[in-house]
Every structure is written in C-alpha cells, then in structure tokens.
Amino acid sequence: MTANVIALLFNGLTLALALGLLVLILWQDPRSETNRYFALFLFMVVLWASGALLGRAAAYVNAGEGVIQIGLRLLDMGFTGASVAVYIYSAVITGIRGTFFRLFALVGVGLVLAYQALLWLVMDSPRAFEVTADGVLLYYFDTPSALLYLGFQVATILLVWRNRNKIRSRTLAYGILLFALAQVAGLLSPRIRMLGGAEDLGSVAALMMSYAVVRQQIMTPLLGRAKQLEAIRDVSLAVTSRLRLQDTLAAVAAQAAGLLGADGAAIFLLEKGVLKLAAVYNLPKPFVGQEVRLGQGVVGTVAVQREAVQIENYARDWKGEPDLPLAHEVFGAVAGVPLVFADQVVGVLLVVQGRQGGLFDRDDVHLLELLGPQAAVAITNSRLFEAERQLSHELSAAKERLEVVLTSTQNPVVAVDRRFRLIFANPAAEKLLGVVRSHVGQPIAEFVAREWLPPSLLQMMRDLRRQQAHIYEVSLDTHTYLCHVAELGKPRPEGWVAVLNDVTQLKELDRLKSQMIQMTSHDLKNPLQAAMSYLELLVEDGEEMFTESMRSDADMIWKQLERMFRMINGILDLERIESGPPSLEVCALEDVLGRVVVDGAGPAQNKGVTLELEIEENLPPVLADSHQLSQAFTNLVENAIKFTPQGGRVEVRAWGHGRRVIVEVTDTGIGIPPQEQARVFERFYRGQQQGVVHVDGSGLGLALVKAVIERHKGDIHLESTPGQGTTMRVTLPITDDF
C-alpha cells in the first residue's frame, strides 16, 4: 500500500518536472530540430506517466473500470510514442538520419497508432488488466505490441551504444540507455509493471536526459561564456603572436581543432582564384598543395557563399566533389567558415571529425566564426610581414651591392639633398674633395672648393628640368673631370647626385686625334690640290689628242678628286666646329636663311626643283655663330635638293614657339627608311635605299649639322616617309634663353 502511494507521488512529481523542462527547452530554441524531437519525446513520456498515474490512482480508489481503461489507453499511447520518439531522437543526435531510419520510424509509429486506434475506437477492445486486493494495478501488453516496442528499444540501445562517441553529453547517452532498458524491463517483467518500476525508471531517465539537454544548451553556454571568450583570446594570442605565415597557419589549424575537440583541421588560402591547401593539423601532410576551385567541395562553397557550412555526415550528406582525397571514406562531421579580411575572402578554415567522431553544433560553428576574423587578420599580417621582410631583404641586398659598387669604383660620387647638404660621398670622392664623415649633413659649399661646384646653379636647374641631367667640366692642375649631375629620387627629387669622371686621358686623346686629323687633312689637301692642278693642265694640253674615252676617264678622275677635296674640307669644318665654342653674337635668323635660299636657288633650278622660303614676321633673334648656322642650313637645303626628284618641292619655314625658334626644311624627295633614320647623323654614313647610290656625298653633311645645332644648345629631329619626303626640324633657343 505504502509503495503504491510512493509510486503515485513520484510519478506526479516527475510529471511536473518533465512538463517544466519541456517548456524550458522549447523556450530556449523552438526552431531547433533536435529540440522539437526531444519535446515530442518528453510529451510522450508525460503522456505515459499521466496514463500510469490516472490508472493507478483509479485502481487505488476503486474509481471504476472505465477510468482505469482511459488511463491504460493514455499509458499505451505514451508508451508507444516514447518508444518511437526516443529512437528518432537518438538517430538525430547521432547523425543517423537516413531515409531508411526515418521511414522505419514513421511506419512503426503509424502501425502502432493505427493498431491502438483500432483496438480503442473501432473494435472497442478492453485493455487487459487486474487490480489486486490492496489496490495495485497490473496491466498486460498484447504480444504484437510488445514485440514492436521491444524492437524499437533494442534498436535504440544498439544505435546509442555504437555511436556513443557522437553524443557529447555522457549523461544524455546514459539517460537514453536507461530509458530503453526501463521500457524493456516493463515489457518483460509483470512484477516490475505492477510495482511501477518501469514508469519510475523511465521518469528518472527522462529527467536525466532533460537535465543533460538543459545543461548542454542553457547552463553550459551561460557558465562557459567566459571560458569561451578566454579560449578565443588564447587562440587569438597564439595565432597573432606568430609572424611567419606557415607558423600562423599551423597555429590556427591546431587551435581550431583543439577549441572544438575535432580530429583534424585544414586551412585553404585563396591564391589567383584557386583555393590551395596551405596547412593541416592531424591530416596527411602530403595533401598540402592540393587545389580546390571556387564552388567546388565544401571549402569552395564556403568561399563563394561567404557563409559557414556544417555537415553531420560527409559521406552521406555531401554529394559534390570531395575536398581532399579519401574524404568520403574518412570524414564524419565537417564544419567550414570563411576567413574574411577587409571584405575579401582570404581563405577557408575547415575542421573535421572522423567517421566515429562527435558532431558539431551551432555553438561550435559560432566559435569558428569568432575565430575566423582573428585568423584572417593574423594571416594577412603574416603575409604583410613576410612581404615586408622580403622587401627589406631585397633592399638590404641592393644597398649592399650599391655600396660595394660605389666604394669599389674609382669615380668620385657625391649626393646632396635639396638644401645642398651632403648625404653621401664614396671613398674616391672623400679622397679627391677632402670630405670626411663629419661633413655629412652640412652644406657642401662649406667644405668643397668653389672650383668643383657648377659654374651656374640657375643653368644647372634649367638643364635638370629640361633634360634631367647637367654636365660640366672641372679642370684642376693636370686633370680634367667631367661632372654628371642628375636628380636623386622620383617622382619628386629628394636631392641630386654627381658623378665625376676623370677624362684627362680622353681629352688628350681627343686633342691628339684632332691634331692628327688636321695635320693629315692639311697634308692631303696640298698634294690633292696639286693633283687637281696638274690634271687640269693635262686636260688642256691634251685636248687635241684625247679620245672620248680618255676625256671620260679624265672627268671621272676630276670628280673623284673633287669628292676627296669636299670630304677633307668637311672633316676640317667638323673638327673646327667641335674643337671650340662658337663665336656667339645676336643673329637675325631670317637673314641667315635668306642667304641660304638664295645660294640654293641655282642648284634647285638646274634640277627642276622648286625652293621656297616662309618666315614668320618679327622672328625672335638667336645668339649664334652666323657662319656655322649658315653652313648647317646650307647642308640641309643641299641635301633636300639632292634627294628630291625633278618637279619636286623644297620648303624652308621658320617661326617662334615660346622661348624657342623652330626651322623646318621639308622636301618631297625619296624619304628615309625607318631602319636608317637613327643613323643618318653618324659620320660617313650614307643610306642604301634606292635613289641614293648615284648621289654624290661624303656622309659628313648631317653630322656637321648636328654638331652645329648641339653647339648652339638646340635640337634636331627628322620625320620621313619613304616615297613621300623628309622634314628636318631644328629648334634653337632665343637670346634670353641661351
């Protein structure tokens, strides 16, 4: 009697606790599939306990058979539903949710409920039971129902035991096993049913399961939030404390696996549109370097969608391309999160469990999502650090090579900043200029003799602005140096660098060369003039005796001697121009060009070529040697006439343009091929195109023109199209700009 009362009270208490836990679980997360299945299980347990409580209470107070029958029917419905629901819930939390299991569960529930409805509503078959003399209820199961219930419980026990490692809470696993064993005991032992032992054990098991679920989903997250944050902090410190990229990747993979208790982890980095496996933890290292395309595999999907992906069973649930070789054979649960930095995906973090490993829940994925940005920052920092270190190494190596070159060269090198303070001087400069280390940072004019500095700073600045270089000579004692000044740094110069070249020997060689050429030319000129004189006398004296062939030979000799004479004069003129500065005076360019055109009018008329002159009014004067300019423009006009066929046209135009004067000599002649245009100003060079071979010339005319124009600080350029003509453009500075 006392035992029966205790059983009734215990059932009532467990019923109230179960209802409270049911409400708490549904309130915590009603959208969770796992919670919905567990709520269904608890509802069925409540229904089972309610039916047992009603039936036993009715039997105890002798309330009548009808009330007992209602209690037993509720007990049957709850027992049936709890048997099926505990199996379905076990399949859900272990990840065994294939079509076969769901179909099996749904068919089983349908059969049992249909059978119960048939007995209760259609056949009105009474439930077999008896009440003892002391008011204890003893009920019985029919054989088909008992076998069906037993099948569900055995399947549940096997399912949970085989996949116990996938259930995180041991209390939950033991609760499921205890519940299944309680129902098995109730099915097999009438005495246990009579004492209410099955209901009591089932209620205790349900309470264990409810406590485990509440602790796992509510208590542990609340109590462990600080620990999770601390773990994230530790992971972040461990990750960000590594500067080398490979060390950072290894730390991220290891910490991610340890944080989730996973069997392995892998990090894929996005490089040139492909995800490449860069680091692994507890996975085969030969896999490192494997590539996965965007959109392929779990990692490719994560990178494209930029969202976390969670898979319970890789072999069953993932139908796409495998992320790694043998992934379908060895991977169980898988979770992947994108590594995003500055709104750009830099990689994907993948954590995996083995086939018999545990499952990942939403909290695990949330932890990975918290770790992802920290890992992305650490990876980006490591990349930047390695790039900086590589750049520093390259700069250091370049600096060392530059220092070796500068210290090894015998040419003095000096660098100054924009305020002309010394930045650098190599050993050759220190020895030549008397510079010491203490002079660095001081104005160069304070410790360097004035003779070494540019004659005109204003002219140096102009040359640097226009030509990016300024060259001047320094002569001291018996040595001559050519100083080449250039800007230091781009795009805005930080200063200037000067390189001094000892050209003493070159100057001496140039002097000897010029002297030799002059002497040789003079020595050749005298006998050449004598030969021309004797040839002229010979032709006059032999006029009556010469045949036509002899006269032709004499004419050819005379032409070749004239050609040699012009060549010698050209060499002498070129050497005279290059040997010293021109005699500068204010020169009216229109007068020079007028004389040149008048002199060229005769040859142009003889060849049938039109020669025209067009000069802008008020043409600015230039500071020049009028004789040299006349010689240069005469050569240009003569060349244009020589290479223009009969009926052609030669135009000479001049106009002012800013601080310069531009003179163009344009012809409609045979033109110059593109491959020969760069060489026409070389000494003794003559073109080989058709129409040139028969034209006399020494190849010195354009070389002389270029030398004259450059001596006057001007420029000369050509534009030519074969078969259409050539334009020679000369640019000279006006007097204020010279």
Image (cartoon, rainbow, N blue to C red):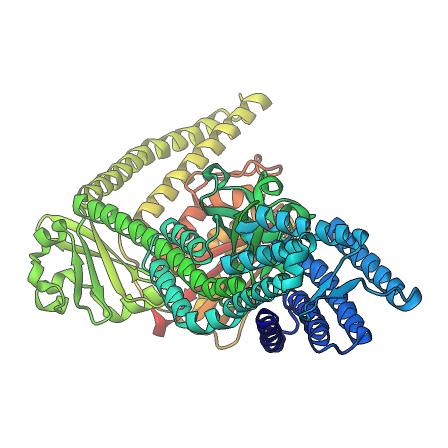
* Horizontal arrangement in the rendering, residue 101 relative to residue 472 (left or right): right
Q: Quadrant of residue 371?
A: bottom left
* Horizontal arrangement in the rendering, residue 403 relative to residue 227 (left or right): left
Q: Quadrant of residue 53?
A: bottom right
The answer to whether residue 320 is above or below residue 554 is below
Q: Nearer the viewer, residue 402 or 413?
A: 402
The answer to whether residue 27 is above or below residue 144 is below
Q: Residue furthest front?
A: 133
Residue 604's x, y, as percent?
59, 52
Q: Nearer the viewer, residue 47 or 405?
A: 47
Q: Residue furthest right?
A: 122
* Residue 360 visible in rendering: no
Q: Nearer the viewer, residue 632 or 718?
A: 718
* Horizontal arrangement in the rendering, residue 694 relative to residue 126 (left or right): left
Q: Quadrant of residue 123?
A: bottom right
In which quadrant of the rendered image does the C terminus lie?
bottom left
In which quadrant of the rendered image does the N terminus lie?
bottom right
- Which residue is pictured at 31% across the width and 37% down the height? 521
- Which residue is pictured at 36% across the width and 50% down the height? 247
Residue 45's x, y, as percent?
67, 67
